[in-house]
Amino acid sequence: MDANGTDRIKRDWLAFDRLDYVVVKIVLGIAVVGSVLFGLGGPVLAAAKDAPLPVSYTTMIASGIELPRGATHDGNATVELMLKDATLGERLTQALPELLIAAMTIAVAWLLYRLLRDTQAGEPFTRRNVWRINTTALIVGIGGMPVQFAQGVADNMIQTSGRIPNQGDPSFVFTFGPLPLIAGIVIALIGEAFRRGVQLRGDVEGLV
Amino acid sequence: MPVEGPHRVVCHLDDLLEARGMTLTALADAVGVSLVNLSIMKNNRAKAIRYSTLTAICHVLGCQPGELLSVERA
């Protein structure tokens, strides 16, 4: 009750209102369109124009190069090569990591969109949504691994093709950042909370 | 028997109402519970009952919870 004697309704600023749902849907839409444009459109356009294929290439530094004062190097340098007359296979393998990222982004956007729709309809606690959240957690947490693997396959394919000096046996570099894993675990915990929510909903449904 | 399994609680609301010459609608009005919820209870589709609901029904019908509910043999 305020000074005028009227009830004041406290607004929960963290609660989603209609505008929030619309904004999130727009953001998800932009993510999908961006993924399709850059992940699929970019490589297809480059292939159609027969544009040189950018390839990351690691080589040993043969002679002295100018370095900032006090700096040293480890003998290796990674350069971006522009490969002319790239074959379709080379283009496809080089595009695979970006395609995978695009596919995962679209998948996560779709899962979140469906979750958002159910939440807006007042039906968030369903087994399907638990599955959606757990799948999102899996993609966010370990989705980087297949991307790195695809990148390794693509780079090794180029390096062992004989078109550029071979740097030895094929190798794969995997880097594990803790952030995606932590994000995946947090999302998985939210999924577990939803699973409990489904159980509670089932209990309350037949309560008289 | 696991808690998650289906219950075997039987509601005798029909018999109690018949014995008192009362309708479900009249009970719903007297107790303050919706007709839909009482119907769910009467047809053994309820999963749980609030003590307050049970108290109110027993008060109106002048019975004990054991007369209203029983557990069917497995």
Image: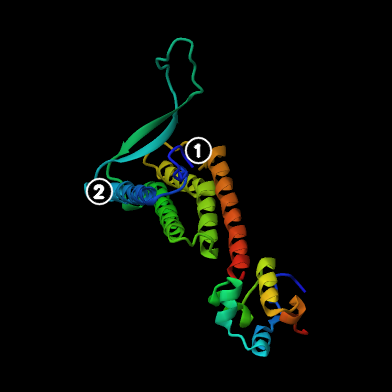
Q: Is residue A72 visible?
A: yes
Give left or right: position of B68 versus A196: right
The reply to whether discs 1 and 2 touch (Cβ–Cβ < 8 Å) is no
Task: Please check whether the numbered discs 1 and 2 fall on a single chain.
Answer: yes
Q: Residue furthest top?
A: A69
Count the marks.
2
| Residue occupying image coordinates x 51% and y 23% | A74
Give the residue pinned by disc 2: A45
B50 or B47, nearer to the observer: B50
Please, which chain is the residue tagged with disc 2 on? A
| Residue occupying image coordinates x 54% and y 47% | A141
Q: Is residue A177 visible?
A: no
Tell me the quarter of the picture where residue A51 sits: top left
Name the residue type under label 1.
Answer: Gly
Give left or right: position of A103 versus B53: left
A124 or A100, nearer to the observer: A124
Residue A168 circle label: 1
